[in-house]
Amino acid sequence: MSAFDTNRVMALGGFAGLISKTVSALRDWNDARVTRNLLARLSDRELDDIGLCRADINWVAQRG
């Protein structure tokens, strides 16, 4: 009988690590871009309703 440890985290190094970090950075950038675009479409009144102003949009998008 053999058992596999499926909860073990495998450390990525070298080229695989670079690809993983690049994909993660692209995903984070796209999430921030989508958030910025959605918030920018809201009116000032709608932003005020959720406690934001236009100057807060970039800050909120980066904190995602």
Image (cartoon, rainbow, N blue to C red):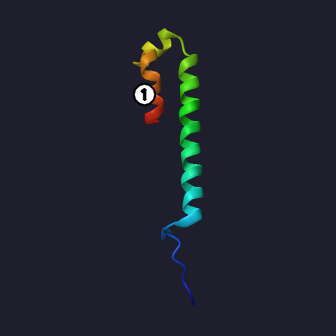
* The N terminus, quarter of image: bottom right
Which residue lies at the image location 49% right of the left edge and 69% below the top edge? 7
Residue type at tag 1:
Trp
Q: Is residue 40 left or right of residue 54?
A: right
Q: Is residue 30 left or right of residue 60?
A: right
Q: Quadrant of residue 49?
A: top left
Residue 21, position in %: x, y? 54, 53
Q: Which residue is mark 1?
A: 59
Q: Quadrant of residue 16?
A: bottom right
Q: Is residue 51 left or right of residue 45?
A: left
Asked if residue 54 is positioned above or below residue 11 in the image, the reply reads above
Which residue lies at the image location 44% right of the left edge and 28% below the top edge? 60
Asked if residue 28 is positioned above or below residue 12 in the image, the reply reads above
**How many C-alpha atoms fall within 10 Å of the one at disc 1: few (<14), some, or many (≥20)?**
few
Out of 35 and 1, give the one closest to the viewer.
35
Asked if residue 27 is positioned above or below residue 20 in the image, the reply reads above
Which residue lies at the image location 55% right of the left edge and 79% below the top edge? 4
Asked if residue 53 is positioned above or below residue 37 in the image, the reply reads above
How many marks do you count on the picture? Answer: 1
Q: Residue furthest left?
A: 51
SS at badge 1: helix
Q: Is residue 60 left or right of residue 4?
A: left
Q: Residue furthest top?
A: 45
Out of 45 and 32, give the one closest to the viewer.
32
Which residue lies at the image location 55% right of the left edge and 66% below the top edge? 14
Residue 47, position in %: x, y? 47, 15
